[in-house]
Image: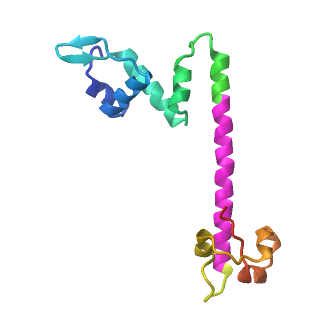
Amino acid sequence: MNAITIGTLARSAGVGVETVRYYQRRGLLPESTGRKGAFRIYGEAELARLRFIRRAQTLGFSLDEIADLLALDHESDRENARALARSKIASVEERIRQLEDVRRALQELVDCCEHTASPAPCPILRALGGEPGQSESNSKPASTRSATAKQSACPAPVG
């Protein structure tokens, strides 16, 4: 592939033309300096850089972080690249912890709903609505409450 248009460049990287232009405005991708008639042309270097940006986004890097990665020298900046990757790992692990908390809260609500006899209000909808009137036993972990206690008072795990 020698000289390609912005449309071909975008399709080759799996993005839209406006995405390419946005990356150019952000300074992540250089503007084309070459022309073929009225069309700006791009080459392998721009395609490789665009694919780099897309792969980094897939790994969760923000565009600002990607700019930092792109500024690194491939030969001499391994330590800086590792530091950026480790920082991303730490933020991913924090997000995983948050998602596990959300899963746990939702599971408690589902369990409570399954063990609450009708015609009581739905514990899930009550918790999401933030309705007051939760009993003191709601502050105890679900594992320490009996099935009878679950029927009368379930946790309100929604923060």
Q: Is residue 47 left or right of residue 115?
A: left
Task: Residue at 67% x, 54% y: name it.
Answer: 100
Toward the right, the furthest residue is: 144
Q: Indicate the quadrant where residue 46 lies.
A: top left
Q: Position of residue 111 (x, y in %)?
A: 67, 73
Q: Which quadrant of the rendered structure holds the N terminus?
A: top left
Q: Residue at x 64, y 59 (%)?
A: 103
Q: How many marks?
A: 0
Q: Is residue 137 left or right of residue 112?
A: right
**In the foreground, 5 or 131:** 131
Residue 25 pos. (x, y %): 39, 25
- Which is nearer the eye, 93 or 21? 21
Question: Does 149 sit above or below residue 97?
Answer: below
The answer to which image quadrant residue 42 occupies is top left
Q: What secondary structure prevails in the magenta region? A: helix
| Magenta stretch, residue numbers | 86-114
